[in-house]
Every structure is written in C-alpha cells, then in structure tokens.
Image (tube, rainbow, N blue to C red):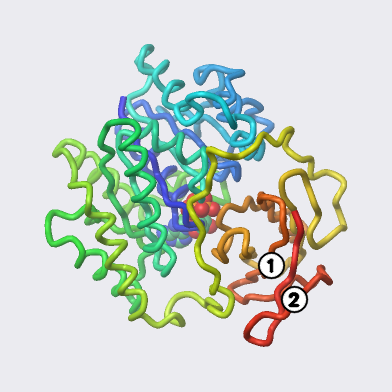
Amino acid sequence: MHTQAVVNQKGGCGKTTTAIHVATFLARQGRRTLLVDLDPQGHATLGLGLTSAASSQGTYEVLIGTRGLEEVLVEGPIPNLAIATASISLAAVEQLLAGRERREARLRDALATLTETARFDEVVLDCPPSLGLLTFNGLWAADRVLVPIDPSVFSLDGLQRLCETITLVEATSGRVIPRDAVLTMFDRRTRFGRDLAATVADAHPREAALLRSRVRVCTRLREAALRGVPVTELDIHCNGFRDYRALTDELLDRREQGGAPLANVCEAAQAGDQASDRVTLTDFEVVDHSVTGSVRGPAPDWLNVEPIAPFPSVAGVAGVYGPIPIKGGVIVRFRDPQAKEVKIAGSFNDWRPDENVITRREEDGTWQKIVFAHPGSYEYRLVVDGDWEADPNNEAQVANSLGGVNSVLHV
Ligand SMILES: Nc1ncnc2c1ncn2[C@@H]1O[C@H](COP(=O)(O)OP(=O)(O)OP(=O)(O)O)[C@@H](O)[C@H]1O
Ligand SMILES: [Mg+2]
C-alpha cells in the first residue's frame, strides 16, 4: 500500500482538486484507492458528492480513536474509490489530542490496520491549508509528498516552510519522504505563469522534483467540484482530464524510478523568494502590501496547544455579522452574495489570507471565517475578491501605517 499526501499550507492552490483526481485516476487503473479527507473544510468529501449526512463518521472519529478506519469508509462515485470523509469537527482534533502521546502518528497507525487486511493499493491524503497537527498526521503517514503550486507569490514562500516541516518529520521519524511539486492552475498565456515555471525549473538543473506534468486552468474542474463528481464523470476531453491523467502516470513512473533527491523543492522555494521580487504583482494577484509588514512568527506550536473542547457551536448566529467570540477563537461573519471569494488576513495569521482559518460559506452569501488564536487582540482585514478592506460590521478599528484602517478582534 502506497500513501501519497497532497500538502501545501497555502490555501486554494489545488490540493483538493489534485487529491481527488490523482485518487480517481489511480482507481480508474484498477488500483483499490482510498482518499482520506484531512481537512475540516471537507472539500474532498463535498467534491466527491458526499455530505455529512451520508457519512456521519469519518476521519475525525478515526483520529480521536472512537472508530477504526475500516468502519468509517464510504464508497466513492466511481469503482475502486473509497473515502474517509471530513467535517468541521476535525478542527477540534488539535485541541482534543493536545498532550496525548503519538498524536502525530494517529493516521499512520490507522492506515497500518489497512495494510494488515490488504484492502487498498493506494492511499491519497488531502491535507488542510495549515501546518498543524492534521498536516503533521498526513506527513507522518506519507510515503511520498506531492506539493501543488499555483501561480502566486505565496506558493513559493509556503514551499520553504513546508520543506522545513517535512525535514522535521523526517528527522523525528527517521525516514526519507520524497517530494514532488506540480504546477496547478497553470496558464502559459500569463507572464507570471511562465515566470513561475521557469523559476521553479531553473532551480532544478538535475532531474527535477518539479514534475513535467502541469495542470492547466480548466473550468470543467470547478464545475465537477460543484457537481460533486471527478471530472472523469463530466468531460473526458477537457484539459483537466488530460492533465490529471498525465500527472498520475508520471507519479507512478517516478515512484518506480525511486523519485527525486530531497533538496530540490527547498531549492525551488529559495529561488522563488528571489524571483518573487522580479514579477509584477498585478500580473496575477492583487495584494496590498501595506498590511504585510508584520514579521512572520515561528511555525504553529501545535505541540503546546492547551485542550479547548468541545468545538464551539456556531448555531444561533444567523443575522449577526462581524466578529463573534468563541472558545479559543473568533468567528468573523460577513455577508456579500456577490463575492466570489472572501478571505481574512490579520496579525493572527501573519497577514496571510486564510492561513490557519476555516471557511464556511452559507447559501445566502454569508461567509464565516473561524479563527483560532491564543488570547489577545489582533488586527485584520477582509480580502473580498482580491480587495483588502476593513470589516464593515466591526466598529473596532485602528489606523494603519498607510492612512487606512484595520479592524480589531479579541480572543
Ligand atoms: N486547474 C484548475 N483550473 C481551474 N480551477 C481550479 C483548478 N484547480 C483547482 N481549481 C479551483 O480552485 C479552487 C481551489 O482549489 P482546491 O480546493 O483544489 O484548492 P485547495 O488547495 O485544496 O484549497 P484549500 O487550501 O482551501 O484546501 C476550487 O474552486 C477549485 O475548483
Ligand atoms: Mg483543499
């Protein structure tokens, strides 16, 4: 049984789409495949048409130890594909397991029970956009790591931090975890798309950890996610189908060849740091650097998190907007039915939009941002379709260095 973790703490870089489709193409080759959703957002679960009603038990129960992995598996929409589903309750795992021994090895131990029954050939892990305990579980369990990189300056920066984390896992687990990187949402027509590819490729004069396959921008992939099926069930002629089929084949080839040397992805990240000065921000992402002045803190100290349980209820807040205190954090509610994407960035996540944040979008266009942080006051702004703005539902504001205002929340 081979376990492939799809990891990048940067949000929205294509992890879930990649995990779903690599799992799908493995399954289509007749390999018995398990997709484990490790993200409290449950996007892989939703993306395969499963709702929490269809799967009341999932990865959460496995990690906290109330169910065995075999007990929670659900059949996927295509043959040979099973899923361990996720729901928002997964967000509580970090707190619930604080102080427990081998908490980072829970998934690995659960997967070991499957090895005994030889039920699966392949396991694909969809990790959340953070470097907390859930991602640690994914890395701990992984035979190999696949890092999707989308065209944004934050992707390469995230890579370097991810490399440090993988190295830590390697050092503590005493084994090597080969890493591959794949460009996602690739658009050769934009200068940044080409620059990014060149930047990462330049860092790999040797046989590259950056895979040859690239996943092009493909609206059919978005459509498939909305319909809750892999793209294979929607359109077998689109780029998404071709690109993920090629990616899966390449991954299998590399596995047989033994894979790339370890340092490559980290080198790419370092090269990317320099390259990101070169590119024009307006080419790809509107980012207001007025608010990125805070120095990045140390990696999340999940080892020291105090237990905060049970997971806060978010019921009873309909019609209430702005920050709502919960145990261990804050929910920021914001309504904009027209907004395609709302993110939150603040001093609690080093002004990295949506990092360490759980998002829920309700049908009426209300966005809920669940922020966990240590007690204290934090400045933040909302990023609505790329525009950074103060929270209109929060009167607590402070002036920022550029003459604008930041909103303030308290944990
Ligand atoms: N190649 C692509 N072309 C077009 N849209 C894509 C592509 N890959 C992913 N998307 C879309 O981009 C969005 C983010 O992708 P996805 O959910 O896979 O990212 P993620 O890294 O898992 O995000 P998160 O960090 O929140 O878990 C989704 O709406 C998805 O449908
Ligand atoms: Mg995801």
**At numbered mark 2, what does the secondary structure look like: helix, strand or loop?**
strand
State whether residue 222 appears in this view. no
Asked whether the beta carbons under mark 2 and mark 1 sit within 8 Å of each other, the answer is yes
The answer as to whether callout 2 falls within 8 Å of ligand 1 is: no
Is residue 177 shown left or right of residue 331?
left
Q: Tell which circle, 2 or 1, labels the residue nearer the N-terminal end.
A: 1
The answer as to whether callout 1 falls within 8 Å of ligand 1 is: no
Q: Residues within 10 Å of mark 1 (few under 14, many from 20)?
A: many
Task: Specify the farthest residue to the top.
Answer: 117
Label 2 is placed on what type of residue? Val
Residue at image mark 2: 398
State whether residue 320 appears in this view. yes
- Residue 96: quadrant of the picture: top right
Residue at image mark 1: 379
Residue 3 location, x and y as percent? Answer: 34, 32
Residue 143 location, x and y as percent? Answer: 30, 33
Label 1 is placed on what type of residue? Glu
Give the quadrant of the N terminus. Answer: top left
Q: Is residue 268 above or below residue 358?
A: below
Q: Residue at x 21, y 38 (%)?
A: 255
Q: Nearer the viewer, residue 363 or 142?
A: 142
Q: Is residue 96 above or below residue 348?
A: above
Q: Residues within 10 Å of mark 2 (few under 14, many from 20)?
A: some
The mark found on residue 214 in the picture is: none
How far apart marks 2 and 1 lie (CA) works out to 8 Å
Q: Is residue 309 above or below residue 205?
A: above
Residue 104 location, x and y as percent? Answer: 47, 31
**At numbered mark 1, what does the secondary structure look like: helix, strand or loop?**
strand
Residue 33 location, x and y as percent? Answer: 38, 29
